[in-house]
Image (tube, coloured by chain):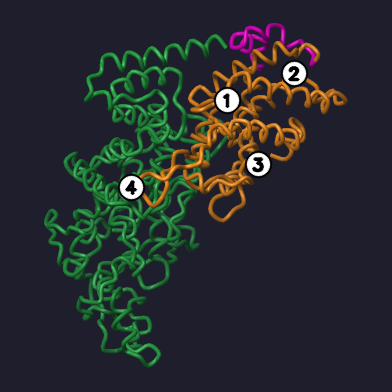
Amino acid sequence: MKVYLQTRLPPQIAFQIALMAFSCSCSKVVDAPQPAEGRSIPPERVNVRSFDQMHETMSALTGIPIHNIAKTNQAESTFNGISGNGLRNQLPQGNSLKQFSAAQQGAIVQLAAPYCDAYVDKLLSNSAQMLEEKFPFMAGFSNSTSQDFTNSKIEKLTGSFYDHFWAACRNRPSIDETQNEISKLMAGLKIEFEDDSELNKPSNYIRVMCVAFLSSSCVSIY
Amino acid sequence: MLLLIMQKIKRILTLASCLYFATFAQLALCLSLESGINVYQRVAGVPPTSEEISEIESLANSGDYRAIARLAMKNKSFYRSTLKYWASAMTNVTQLPSVDLNDFSATVIGIFRDEVPLKEMLYEDILYIGNSTELVKIAPFNAGVTLKAYSDADNNHYRQLDIYGVDLSDPNLLIRTTQSGRSILPPEATMGVMTTRTAGLAFLKDGTNRRMVRFSMVNFHCRDMEQLHDITIPDYRVRQDVPRNAGGDSSTYITKCAGCHAGMDALAGAFALHDFVPTRNPDNTFSNRVIYLPTVANKFFRNDFTYPDGHVTLNESWINLWTRGQNADLGWRFSGDENPYTGTGAKALGVVLAGAKAFSVCMAQRTYTQVCGRTAPFDDGEKLAFTRIANVLESSNYNGKVLFEESVGLCVGE
């Protein structure tokens, strides 16, 4: 995982991006629970996904089978069980929001990163065909540079991810709010990436956008 | 953006048609699309696809949350995440749901999937394992990953099914077999999931086998010893290792110890021949397994000098003293050939435990906790709902899926 993050997404950037996306939608989703009449315990109106549910959700949204991630991500360390320190123990043990802590956001980013990596790789694997089929506005993308990754393309891609990854999200932030956040993130990334030709590729921007969407509260909370 | 506007218009039209066509009685049953999606996610654990959202929309329009739950149960994630969590909390003493798939949880998942009567998980000679014939044909086992075969001595087989995300909803990949055919247990020694390797590790290893009674009650009647504690029942089955005058004061025994031990020790005889100890493998190494002994396990005589006049376990007989006193309200019933008062062996005890009303109510409570995210203490309305769902479960011949259909209805719209 560490190797992956170092070569593809600088960890601090991926983390910050995901946290920003998370906090953006979190403020929309989490209302203060109102005690129901006659109940001593407030009803759980919002649930957090457990480790397995997050895995299944990210797999379903990206179309990447879990075994692909398990293979590429050193299954034993990632999936460590009860006694280990793998992701399983860093993610919520159940669905109660009470079991969710801020530290778990880092683990969600860690889980989202290989899915997005595989997702973008899959989009690019059939030359430009699959990518352009899914995102027509990305025509000619495979030969483009980061300079071609214009605000217009970012907006359209954000809209596509918004509709795809957050289709079932209740109380999702508006598309305008989301685009505003993503634009800021991309602008920050361009500054971070500009001196590194390995990182400064459009595909890496898409990976980061994907991680931001996939590790957001819209995906991890329902 | 256009898609978003279209979606909003569609939702408004749907809601309008719902209001227009509904009578006042039906009006309360109309669900918003958001509520419908929420029902789906509570059951499946994952968001619905675009196609499923359309289906949910029409089902929500008619207020049919049960159908939405059924749709969610078709998703493989229901088995791999929701049901796995539902079952996993029962597999260890800390009640932690986030553990690897194991023979216990896989068997529960198979029972739900195949709509085997749920109560059979407490007494049947049943086990679900990965079908190696089919698994080796699919990724990643057809691409360099060696499938680990089932063994009653380790959890490697199930751990692999877990790690590689094997589709447990596929009846070709997770198949039913018997514990007696896959382990050294004879059929008469099996007690459903409670005699799987995982249960043996958690509840039979070391100790005095009283843990088997305690966690049978915790798992399947949702009652721990504090709730079962009853000092009004006779203590003639309390074993020799329980001091009758701890600290020189016999009142402690009478008011505290006997309250749990009287009922628990009387039932623990059911597990007198079971143990979880190292046994020899074909390669002459040793691994822990659930075994069934020809005579009473030594652990039943540990510290027998503490109170020599205490009960001496001679065989697998058990007496259910909880049929009287405060625990009579667990709803003990005659079940099959077994009576709720006395019996011999773990299987007979499993039949009685599963036949009690408390079993059905507990299953409803567990499901409600899972899908609605609520925990004890429950209010009177919730307790009534558990009884209603328990009745539905029993009238469906213990089809576990109805638990999810009914339970999710208790938190629709939240």
Residue B88 coordinates in the image, percent (x, y):
42, 49
Span highlighted in magenta in the image? A124-146
- What crowding class fits label 3: few (fewer than 14 Cα within 10 Å), some (14-19), or many (20 or more)? many
Q: Quadrant of the N terminus of chain B?
A: top right
Residue closer to the observer: B138 or B162: B162
Kind of residue at badge 1: Pro
Q: Which chain is green?
A: B
The answer to which of marks 3 and 2 sits earlier in the sequence is 3
**Foreground disc of the pair 3, 2:** 3
Query: Looking at the image, is B90 positioned above or below residue A144?
Result: below
Local secondary structure at mark 2: helix
Q: Residues within 10 Å of mark 2 (few under 14, many from 20)?
A: some
Image disc number at residue B127: 4
Q: Chain of mark 1?
A: A
**Residue where numbered disc 1 is placed:** A173
> Label 3 vs label 2: CA separation?
24 Å
Q: Amino acid at mark 4?
A: Leu
Q: Is residue A3 left or right of residue B398?
A: right
Q: Colour of chain A?
A: orange
**Label number found at residue A202:** 2
For disc 3, the marked residue is A106
Does A215 appear above or below B27? below
- State how far apart marks 1 and 3 are (Cα): 21 Å
Parent chain of label 2 = A
Do pointers 2 and 4 mark residues of a single chain? no
- With respect to residue A78, does B270 lie above or below? below
Mark 4, mark 3: which one is toward the viewer?
3
Q: Amino acid at mark 2?
A: Pro
Q: What amino acid is at disc 3? A: Gly
Give the image location of residue B190, x and y in percent. Answer: 28, 57
